Amino acid sequence: MIKRNLVAVLFVLLLASAMIAAEPVQWVSKPALTWNEQNQQGTVTFELASLTDVEVAIIHPATGEIVRHLAAGVLGPQAPPPLVANSRAQRIVWDGADDYGNPAPLPSDLVVRVRAGMSVALEQIVGGDPYLYYSDEVGDNDHSPWGINGLEAKSDGKVYVWGHSSNLGPPALRQYDVDGNYLQTLFPMPAGKDPSAMQGWGINLRPDGGYSPKFNLLTSPSLTTTFLDARLHMARLLPTAEKDRLQFWRTGLTDGAFDLMTINTDGTIAEDPAEQLLGPLVKHPPFGYGPVAPNKVDIHSLIGPVFVCFAPDGESFFLSGLYAATTVYGNERDVEMDSFWRDGQVWKVDVKTRTAKVFFALDKQEIPTTKRDRAVAYGGSRSYAALHGVAVNAAGNVFVCDRLHQRILVLDPQGAIVRELPVEHPDAIALSKKTGVLYVTTRSGDTRGSGAVRLLRFPDWRKDNAPSEDIEVSPQGYNREQSHSYVVVCDTDQGSNVWVAHSQMPVRIYRDHGAGLQLLKDFYRVEGAQRCVGFDRMQVDPKTEEVYLLDDHDTVWKVSDWKNPQFVKVPLETACIAIDARRRHIFGRTLRDGSSSNSVGRIARFHLEQDYAPANYGNTGTHCVTEQMHYEWCFDGNSDKGVAVAPNGNLAVVGKTQDGLRVFAGNDNQLPWAGLKIADLPNNAGGVRFDLAGNLYVGYVDKRPTIALPGFEEDKYLPAIGRIHKYAPTGTLQSGNLFPQAPAGPTHTYDVLYGAFETQCVTRSPRFGLDGYGRIYYPTNIAQRVSVIDNAGNEILHFGTYGNRDAKGGLPGDQTSSRDIPLAFPNSVDATDNYIYVADMVNLRLLRLQKDFQQEATSE
């Protein structure tokens, strides 16, 4: 009760502060600039009727270009210099210099502009492609665990696709109609629902009545406390006979018994675990998962792909694809042929009792048991089983993909073989209820990348000995264990729509008019599709408004045309960037520099406006600034934690724990530059920037912030939220070395809610931005919030609420009535003079917000 009362009080205070901020801002005297030619300095004056935030700039009257970012901050007791504290009337002296300390040409011709009372308005969202899943076209490779983990067509005509949306790992559950037109996203969970219907996901309740997801992990990130999303071991969608419920399974929760979880097809979920968690897929006999002996790493496991189809009466289902084996650290060692769950069988499972019986079995003596023999027999990898896909028709005939004998088996309702169709490497299977046409996907391949996925069509399975069509749908067929291709059929008045899915495609829909298959929709060829899978790191060129996004491996995208924004890959391979807007350079860490590992490299300089060609230093013949560095590499990406460039060209790098924060300074004729450690940093550090005066800012976790975050008091990641620290230079910009000596410590610590940092694999630390006035823009990722503070730490504004990709903040296509800017995981923020940019690494989209001001005036 006390906690609820405290939250209520905090909410009232927040409302009160919002009301104060909403008071109209009025001029008492508009800005004026007086230039004294004799003293070569100017005086800026203005007065407001109330204390609010302001920004003061010296500009060219004709172009509006800013010559000097003179001052910005919240007027009041902590107004940052050169603003006068506790005064609505301001008088600021301008020394006649531009942002870099150079005399401004014709200063008497310049004017002052003052803008007051900043707010933001969502202008554009780029990305959020509802057809984008992570695959070969956007960076997948032969050993990636990410892919398509479910495809299901319901009787009401809705089709559900479940798979990883990017190389970060967060999955997406999306709903489409039978023709593949996007309808809605069910996971990440929808916004705008009754919180009581979303509690089962694991949520934080916000004071405004909304909710935010709790996280299993931040690395992926995993936006739920259920087992639906748990990094690499993502649950898999399992077909059900119910049109309004979806079912998932995952091993390892209750003795590895393939536990089941269910959600509703509108994205709601039962709060009661007894209604949400359905227990094991099969209760009798038990799967027998567990250590071979106490304290042993040998595990009795069930592995292989899992295929399920329901009998026509819905009272039982057929199960195939599994086999029992002993594994060591997840790697198959011995196939167990004496188990009830041995390879080469199809089981029939009673829905009510979850009791399994063997429905069909291949001869035990035929089953290969060594890795080599199984790879040869099954198509090249240990990810295959003897029997794969299973389907059933209205008459009760069961169709089974027999990889061992390279055939499709047709069984009668009692399990006797009535027909064999020769097919190489059959994987998944489906039938049209309307026409009886049989569709089969075939799949082969291994870790070396061989094999393919094909779609076969058999018009009459009773007599056909060969398919009428054989189409290659993916040149790569390999998947990791417990993965496979998918095929489902949706009968329509125009013909049968055959959906095929696989990690490397990821979805294609073929229309069968009766005369053959025609491609109806390719998820990677949808008009207007956006292919960027980055969004975890982002920087903006303040001169051009061009935005650079990184995917945490080595790919960089750019958005430059805001009238027709598109993600365009640029010819850079780096996991980190820093933009030198003054000299028109971009810095990044080279990959695999003299090494086969992308865990090493040097910080190097490239031209921003010459196709990113290397920008060599003087006569050195190299564009590399630093010595070769080593970065911890995780499977989830490169652990670069931040690079920044100062106005004079100095570099700051956040490295491994032993390296801490280093600054590199030198001249153009002597490389590599020497690095000086500025500060020791903890492992959970990330984000670094310079301001125009050469002050250095870095984010890291040093102690729990003191700021309240209503609704998140019990969130497990609250202690992992960092703060931002400022280090004043010990040298000067003009000397060429901002830090000839290490400072004694930070000159200011901003007690803010910066990020939160994942401690298990620190690869995607948050990123903050600075504008020309020294204002700081930072994300609070777990609370879907972005804040703006002045250089003294006064908050100017904050915005953001939870929303998945269907929430668009009132822009066209918005499917929710969100109260604020919708975000799912804002991990990187940057700003220019007129815009704020937010990269959302779960919704996979870039938000562009325009800065608005209650008052703006320019001197005459």
Image (tube, rainbow, N blue to C red):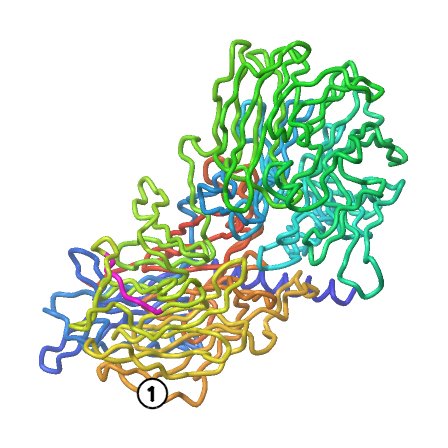
Closer to the camera in the image, 520 or 645: 520
- The x and y percentages for residue 829 are 44, 59
Check disc 1: other Cα within 10 Å, few if <14, some if 14-19, many if 20+: some
Boundaries of the magenta span: 602-608
Dot 1 corresponds to which residue?
A: 730
> Is residue 335 in view?
yes
Three-letter residue code for mark 1:
Thr
Which element type, helix, strand or loop, lies under badge 1?
loop
- The x and y percentages for residue 805 are 53, 43
Q: Main secondary structure of the magenta part?
A: strand
- The x and y percentages for residue 166 are 51, 47
> In the picture, which quadrant includes the N terminus?
bottom right
> Is residue 275 in view?
no
Is 787 situated left or right of 254 in this image? Answer: left
What residue lies at 35% left-to-right and 53% top-to-bottom?
547
Is 629 situated left or right of 403 in this image? Answer: left
* Total marks in image: 1
What residue lies at 69% left-to-right and 58% top-to-bottom?
329
- The x and y percentages for residue 263 are 72, 40
- On whether residue 115 falls in the magenta region, the answer is no
